[in-house]
């Protein structure tokens, strides 16, 4: 089962290493990790998407992460109302003959072409993991040359 865990941590050296170490010791599969500064200079937000077999396993991981030095708060936001986004860059084969067709295919995804060469285009798409996956499946028949995904980042909605 897929779980989204967010943490606010002090922005100090080694925090991410200790954080991922807890998951490694528990043999939890990490789908993605996203880390960045928050609105406060001394704190960072870590968003981790993990795969666990049981909800109890996710709860245990959250409790262990909350005990770490430099961790301010850890929450599993999967079942809460939350905002989640991921970014993907996709380089697609795009000879001149099919470019117009590709442009019309990517429009419903609100994707942007950010680089064009004689044989390829690079497309940026932002959305949920499901939207990104659907986009990849739509452009795959044209031939994906490269794909880079950031992983999910997010937090709970306001009340």
Image (cartoon, helix red, strand yellow):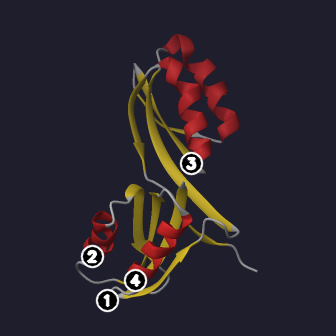
Label located before the other in sequence (4 or 3): 4
Within 10 Å of the Cα at label 4, are there few (<14), some (14-19), or many (20+) other Cα atoms? many
Residue ID for mark 1: 69
The residue at the point 60 percent across, 40 percent down is 111
Label located before the other in sequence (2 or 1): 2
Element type at mark 2:
helix
Query: In the visual, does 106 lie left or right of 118?
Result: right
Residue ID for mark 3: 129
The residue at the far top in this view is 97
Element type at mark 3:
helix
Query: Looking at the rendered structure, which numbered label has been put on residue 9?
Result: 4
Q: Quadrant of the C terminus?
A: bottom right
Marks 4 and 1 in Cβ contact (< 8 Å)? no
Residue ID for mark 2: 18
Label located before the other in sequence (4 or 1): 4
The residue at the point 29 percent across, 64 percent down is 24
The residue at the point 53 percent across, 77 percent down is 75
Q: Nearer the viewer, residue 43 or 81?
A: 81
The residue at the point 61 percent across, 27 percent down is 103
Measure how far apart labels 4 and 3 are at the Cα level: 24 Å
Label located before the other in sequence (2 or 4): 4
Marks 2 and 1 in Cβ contact (< 8 Å)? yes
Q: Which of 95 and 136 is in front in this view?
A: 136
């Amino acid at each position: 089962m897929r779980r989204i865990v967010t943490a606010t941590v002090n922005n100090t050296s080694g925090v991410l290493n200790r954080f991922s170490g807890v998951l490694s010791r528990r043999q939890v599969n990490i789908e993605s990790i996203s880390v960045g500064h928050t609105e406060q200079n001394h704190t960072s937000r870590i968003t981790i998407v993990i795969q666990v077999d049981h909800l109890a396993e996710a709860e245990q991981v959250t409790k262990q992460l909350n005990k770490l030095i430099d961790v301010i708060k850890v929450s599993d936001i999967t079942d809460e109302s939350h905002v989640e986004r991921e970014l993907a860059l996709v380089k697609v084969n795009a000879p001149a003959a099919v470019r117009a067709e590709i442009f019309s295919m990517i429009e419903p995804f609100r994707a942007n072409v950010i680089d064009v060469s004689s044989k390829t285009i690079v497309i940026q798409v932002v959305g949920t993991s499901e939207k990104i996956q659907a986009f990849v499946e739509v452009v795959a028949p044209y031939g994906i040359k490269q794909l880079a995904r950031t992983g999910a980042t997010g937090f709970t909605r306001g009340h």
